[in-house]
Image (cartoon, helix red, strand yellow):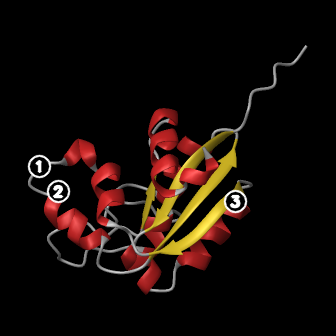
Amino acid sequence: MTEHTQPERSLVLVKPDGYQRGLTGEVLRRIEAKGYTLVALAVTDARPDQLADHYAEHEGKPFYEPLVEFMSSGRLAAAVIEGHGCIPGFRALAGATDPTAALPGTIRGDLGRDWGGSVQQNIVHGSDSTESAAREIDIWFPDLG
């Protein structure tokens, strides 16, 4: 007998740099082409409380303030995706955090670059674990809980 597990969910953010450059559709196209399902989607301005909660583990680090400033610099697209293995799958699709080092074929490798700013502008965020995904989805989509 085959064991069926529930598909997992992940939060994906198209950060202000990606949204401003008109890359939201391309990011969503790649997610859907990979076979993941969009469960929720919103275009929004990040609220200070959302960013404080989202980046709580980084508070006090030197990059925290520039990161929060960047993430509040413009609109972003927030999505919840679903599918078996979607957390590691999306992170592989996104590519290395540093767009200069990200491999061709990944979102960051194909679409990102170093802009010389004080914080890495790398187009997307994806949850890194099921625990992070649950916490982050609750921050950005509290009605899904």
Determine whether, in the image, residue 35 is placed left or right of residue 132: right
- In this view, the residue farthest toward the bottom is 21
Q: Position of residue 140 (x, y in %)?
A: 48, 57
> What's the distance in space between the residues labelled 1 and 3, CA to CA?
33 Å
Nearest to N terminus: mark 2 or mark 3 = 3
Residue under the point 58% across and 61% down: 79
The tag on residue 36 is: none
Q: Amino acid at mark 1?
A: Lys
* Residue at mark 1: 61
- Where is residue 123 shown, x and y percent of the image? 41, 70
Q: CA distance from mark 2 to mark 1?
A: 5 Å
Q: Residue at x 65, y 61 (%)?
A: 40
| Nearer-the-camera pick, 116 or 5 | 5
Please say if 107 is above or below 131: below
Q: Amino acid at mark 2?
A: Tyr
Residue at figure coordinates x 46%, y 80% from the top left: 19
Crowd around label 3: few <14 · some 14–19 · many ≥20 (10 Å): some
